[in-house]
Image: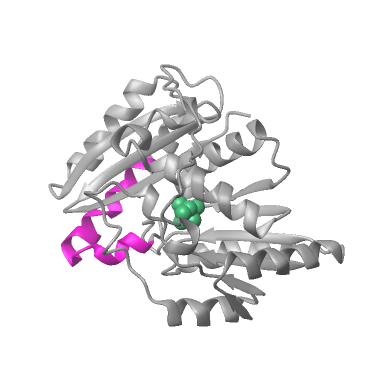
Amino acid sequence: MKVIKTIKEMKEWSSSVRQAGKTIAFVPTMGFFHEGHLSLMREGRRRGDLLIVSLFVNPTQFSPNEDFKNYPRDFERDRKMTEEVGVDILFAPEVIEMYPPDHQTSVRVEKVTQNLCGKSRPIHFQGVTTVVMMLFEIVMPHVAIFGEKDYQQLVTVQQMVRDLHMGVEVVGMPTVREADGLAMSSRNTYLLPEERKAARSLHQSLQRAKELLQKGERNADRIIHEVREILQSESLVRIDYAQICDANTLQDVDRIERDVVVALAAFLGKTRLIDNLIYRIF
Ligand code: PAF
């Protein structure tokens, strides 16, 4: 596996691979890998002749009060893990390379970014779409793989790719979970032992939502009421949001008559975790 640090070298590599008629699969990441990232990489390995992973903690998707500086980083550990999965290129640019001092352009997707995390993290998705647009331009992938844990991110990137006619296939992969159901996340490493225990309630509440949906409950308020009760039974959990939205538009629904996502965000101490259940009606 080769590590590439500059945009120039990355573009030259991708151009020559494309000219040779090979397909490129791409997994964008912010590093500190866990099994969830590895599952995206394995899917990428399956879908492309060559696999590129980017490792870049993107400053523009963090607000000043968020964890950009403390975001977990361990380049050597990540490098070894990508090598083991069979990644061809690890693209790991510096911030100054991606955002030189005169950088002034950003990409904003309108409607699907307004609800859910968009409310509590107003600049987040603009930072994500800007960096993903840049990475697509540099890496030139045929297919890009994202995790469904960040469901709003996945829908937003798919919308951007459609709106800008970008010609990249964007694939979502199921959330990978710990044995007790907690969705894997690099941020889980922040949790104190008692917060880690309480964090199980996120998945438990979604499981209850699934049970109710499977029994035929179609009233969103009734489901959310039970979800909140489970979350609130843990004193260490502070709910940011618990909502049921149309799976495509991400607008709230009152009745479940089409595919929906039951989406949660909650704080455990200073750590904000998200999780969701995608429920398909047909
Ligand atoms: O999901 C992530 O890790 C990031 O939001 C992404 C897509 C790599 C953009 O920085």
Counting from the top left corner in percent of width and height, residue 147 is at 52, 52
Magenta range is 186-206
Instruction: Give the position of the N terminus as an image quadrant.
Output: bottom right
Would residue 96 be found to the left or right of residue 160 on screen? left
The answer to whether residue 56 is visible is no
Say how the picture is coloured: one colour
Would residue 55 be found to the left or right of residue 166 on screen? left
At 43% across and 20% down in the image, what residue appears? 253
Q: Looking at the magenta stretch, what is its main secondary structure?
A: helix
Counting from the top left corner in percent of width and height, residue 158 is at 60, 39
Q: Which residue occupies the extreme front position in the image?
A: 102
Counting from the top left corner in percent of width and height, residue 142 is at 73, 53
Residue 58 image-quadrant placement: bottom left
At 24% across and 49% down in the image, what residue appears? 64
Is 205 in the magenta? yes
Q: Which residue occupies the extreme top position in the image?
A: 254
Counting from the top left corner in percent of width and height, residue 66 is at 25, 51
At 41% across and 22% down in the image, what residue appears? 252
Residue 262 image-quadrant placement: top left
Is 74 in the magenta? no
Would residue 5 be found to the left or right of residue 185 on screen? right
Q: For this rendering, which residue is in front, 169 or 93?
A: 93
**Up-down: is 7 above or below 263?**
below
Residue 248 image-quadrant placement: top right
Q: For this rendering, which residue is in front, 250 or 262?
A: 250
**Up-down: is 282 above or below 218?**
below
Instruction: Give the position of the C terminus as an image quadrant.
Output: top right
